[in-house]
Image: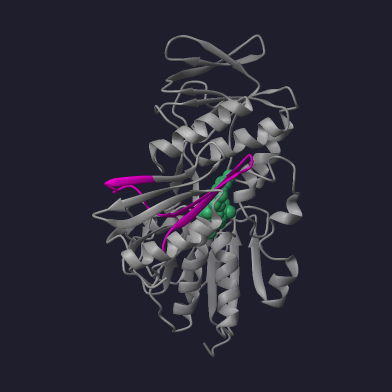
Amino acid sequence: MKNTADNVVIIGASHAAAEVISTLRKAGWEGKITLIGDEENLPYQRPPLSKAYYSGDINTDKLAIKNPSFYEMTKVGLVLGARADSVDRANKEVVLENGTRVSYTKLVLATGTRARLLPVEGADAPCIKYLRTVADVDDTKSTLAPGGKLLIVGAGYIGLEVAASAIKQGIEVIVLEAQERVLARVTSEPVSAFYQDIHRQAGVDLRLGVGLKRFVTKEDENFAELADGELVKFDCAIIGIGVIPNVELAEHAGLACDNGIIVDEFTQTEDPDIYAVGDCSNHPSQIYQKRIRLESVPNAVAQAKTAALSICGDNRVYDQLPWFWSDQYDVKLQTAGLMQEHDEVVVEGDVAARKFTVSYFRGGKMIALDAINSPALFMKAKKRICMDLQVDN
Ligand code: FAD
């Protein structure tokens, strides 16, 4: 830590990156820090992209995770708008796309995820968009005026949040979902049914169990052709069918990857000088006794702290209870834990009043909870789940 020539290089100007920098300096890292990011922006928050930023309630300034002065104060070398092409582990260098080599003492991969592409005919048309970056949102919004027709493919968190934000702006919204219910991957039937109701009440044309055959353009008009032959007209489409972790740098450098870059409880890869944090990493969860890859800000931030402390010689096991949130209309969903392996579901509260909880149990132990407009119960459940699963969070 005393050698000021040492360089921690972070790839990905991400949520996690901002936290790595902050924790490194707080923990006394005196060496260099270099941040390499392929977007032009300093690290910014992605959650508002489908919420307040999409609906126009906040501008880009409010997205910044840290003010520009933070990077000056922490003396970070910024290499933005530059893509890392490979990692030369033998020489401990990152090679940029333009051929520049950046030496590292410790390397942190915080490359996040990218949108999963929809493999249907016509999906490469300019009116078909994905939503991952601030540039994506600006681009999408420039093609839609109030009264325009937005087609959303996929009723996951991002698709539904965009639906709520767009309706608020007077845009007509159609959502196509292949499954028989929304949010099927992440929650239970009562919560899905609730969200289906509130979107339909708000005027979203929500279609479930629908197959999408292809996109076609006829006489300057765009259509989605459904499996039954129906043509659905739209101006712009957003595809929200999940993401893929950006593991290629690690993979080509010979590091183990399996649904994310494999790391240990200290976020370290099999190379002791390389860490991976945030959405791109796959870590061992002591709580759930299995490997998991999470897509959430709390995970990215907590893993970033773990990595930075470990670089400074302070190894602390990362084992935070996963938690998530989603804002749609006047409804805040907060989720604690992972519900997938439950054997019992308990619904409490007033669903019609949009204030209720759904608790998930396995063998009598609480493993997860969905709290709708119930922040106090969410906090309580976090503690209960940790107690039931015997974790110290
Ligand atoms: P990211 O923030 O994804 O950043 C990774 C960065 O690395 C990107 O800028 C990428 O371009 C860059 N990069 C990748 N490869 C390279 C390379 N080779 N060279 C240089 N740079 C590279 N999470 C929540 O918890 N709650 C929410 O409500 C929520 N809503 C969301 C809404 C939207 C629209 C989106 C897109 C995400 C949302 N998320 C939400 C997820 C959350 O944003 C992510 O979990 C979080 O951003 C992960 O941070 P990260 O540090 O892993 O990487």
Q: Residue at x 56, y 65 (%)?
A: 17
As drawn, which residue projects farthest toward the left?
363
Give the x, y percent position of residue 360. Answer: 35, 50
Give the quarter of the figure containing the C terminus.
bottom left
Span shown in magenta:
321-346
* Residue 35 occupies quadrant: bottom right
Give the x, y percent position of residue 129. Answer: 59, 32
385 part of magenta stretch = no
For residue 390, say whether it is visible.
yes
* Residue 32 occupies quadrant: bottom right
* Residue 181 occupies quadrant: top left
Depth order, front residue of 73/229:
229
Give the x, y percent position of residue 359. Answer: 39, 50
| Colour scheme | one colour
Asked if 217 appears above or below 299 in the picture, the reply is above
Depth order, front residue of 280/247:
280
Q: Residue at x 38, y 60 (%)?
A: 253
Q: Is residue 347 left or right of residue 133?
A: left
Q: Residue at x 60, y 50 (%)?
A: 47
Give the x, y percent position of residue 157. Answer: 51, 41
Q: Is residue 237 left or right of residue 344?
A: right
Depth order, front residue of 209/67:
209
Asked if 330 appears above or below 108 in the picture, the reply is above
As drawn, which residue projects farthest toward the bottom?
2
Q: Is residue 231 left or right of residue 81?
A: left
Q: Residue at x 55, y 77 (%)?
A: 7
For residue 96, say whether it is visible.
no
322 part of magenta stretch = yes
